[in-house]
Amino acid sequence: MLDTLLDLTDTQKEIRELARAFAREHVAPFAEQWDREAHFEPSLVGKLGEAGFLGMLIPEEYDGLGLDTSSYLLALEEIAAADASTAVLMSVHNSLPTQMILRWGTDAQKERWLRPMARGELLGAFALSEPDSGSDAASLRCQAVRDGDDWVLTGTKAWVSSGTHAGVIVAMARTDTADMRRGGRGISAFIITPDLPGFSIGKKERKMGLCASPTVSLVFDEMRVPADRLLGEINYGFVYAMQSLDHGRMGIASQAVGIARAAFEAARAYADQRQQFRRPIRDFQAIQFKLADMASRVTGARMMLHATARAKDRGDKVTIYSSMAKLLASETAMFVADEAVQIFGGYGYVKEYPVERYLRDAKVTEIYEGTSEIQRVVIARELYT
Ligand SMILES: Cc1cc2nc3c(=O)[nH]c(=O)nc-3n(C[C@H](O)[C@H](O)[C@H](O)COP(=O)(O)OP(=O)(O)OC[C@H]3O[C@@H](n4cnc5c(N)ncnc54)[C@H](O)[C@@H]3O)c2cc1C
């Protein structure tokens, strides 16, 4: 929809078509049921892996597709338009744990973890947040203490997307408790697997949207983590997490664009067929203007996002742009989904049609991987440095 401005390459168009076909066959027909039953479909991970969607940014030498960021975001938009819950699984996996291992992992770590992650044999998750540490992520309290050949981790990570089914979790823990004021510099990143002694899955959240994506807390009870699971340098995990969020936020922006596009397309189709006052409601200028605003915002958010992706692939620093893209796209998703419900009238408010799900799913894009307030903090900070 309205994507001619994107100027896509043939490969990018092909990837988008593949993702669209995958979503049509394996995701869209089940999205309503998975949402209603809050069901995470485990077989989806293998299917996404087989199709290459879990290794899109992993180089071919590690069994990935080694694609550019725009291709990945285009595929993600297609999946999100079918089901936002499936999109968050794909976004977190591709943007955070795999990217962190790729960028800061040793050769042995890449060899051991990236291959199965690229093939969809191991699903990745990211554990930064804690019950008392969200926007102020550097205040996290989960502790890692060295004991012989192991690290011993104690604490609770909160809100871990895909946490019930993840085979690899990149988790942040404090390794230097001497001076909390040093902020990020006392935190390290660890590669965690659910088989480690002391690991357990805690509370599963009951959510307003994204119901088919399991969000859980993870409890580390004196969990022994072999020393070779430390990712990158000691005390630099927080820095790595923040740098990776540049990428993560593009993923969430793409998820938001996908939800918004789906809401727009549903509303446009409904406006064509719904008759009131003996004419389709699309004949009313009030409805046409809503659709015009919706289309403009979706197109604008998508353009911002893909311009950011291209800058990233050129090697530019994109912190300010990825925050802008996430801010614009998530607010677009909320605006467009809300207007879609309005265009559907009473039918928008019931579960017979998908637009109420779009509205519920859109909200979280303004919250996770940094709230809209935090995106504004980041943008303002970048403006003044
Ligand atoms: C469905 C879901 C999935 C998630 N998945 C993951 C995951 O996989 N991994 C992970 O680590 N985390 C995950 N999160 C956590 C998410 O990133 C946090 O919820 C988010 O960062 C906000 O933190 P908080 O909820 O503690 O809110 P708080 O930080 O307590 O914020 C509360 C309010 O205060 C505002 N606020 C806080 N600080 C400031 C400030 N300095 N200036 C202005 N306003 C401020 C916030 O914007 C917000 O409106 C997930 C969350 C949800 C809901």
Image: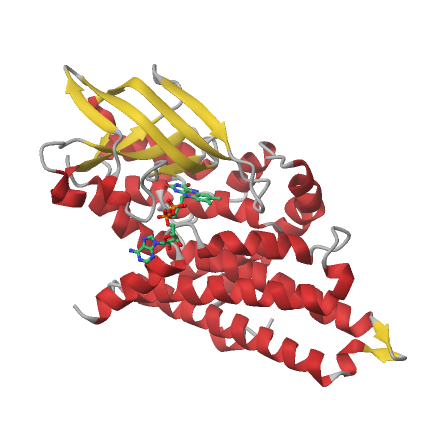
The residue that appears at 47% across and 70% down in the rendered structure is: 301
Whether residue 68 is visible to the viewer of this picture, yes or no, is: no
Instruction: Examine the rendered structure and indicate whether residue 201 appears above or below residue 330.
Output: above
Locate residue 349 relative to residue 384 in the image: left or right. Answer: right
Can you give x and y, in whole percent of width and height, for residue 76 in the image? Answer: 51, 54
The residue at the far front in this view is: 132
Q: Residue at x 71, y 47 (%)?
A: 29
> Where's residue 53, x and y in %?
49, 46
Q: Quadrant of the N terminus?
A: bottom right
**Quadrant location, the C terminus:** bottom left
* The one of 174 and 349 positioned closer to us in this rendering: 349
Can residue 124 be seen here? yes
Q: Would you place residue 201 above or below residue 261 in this image?
A: above
In percent of width and height, residue 70 lies at 43, 62
Q: Is residue 131 above or below residue 345?
A: above
Q: Residue at x 36, y 45 (%)?
A: 96
| Residue at 55% across, 77% down | 296
Side of 12 relative to 319 (left or right): right
Task: Answer with the quarter of the image where residue 348 lies.
Answer: bottom right
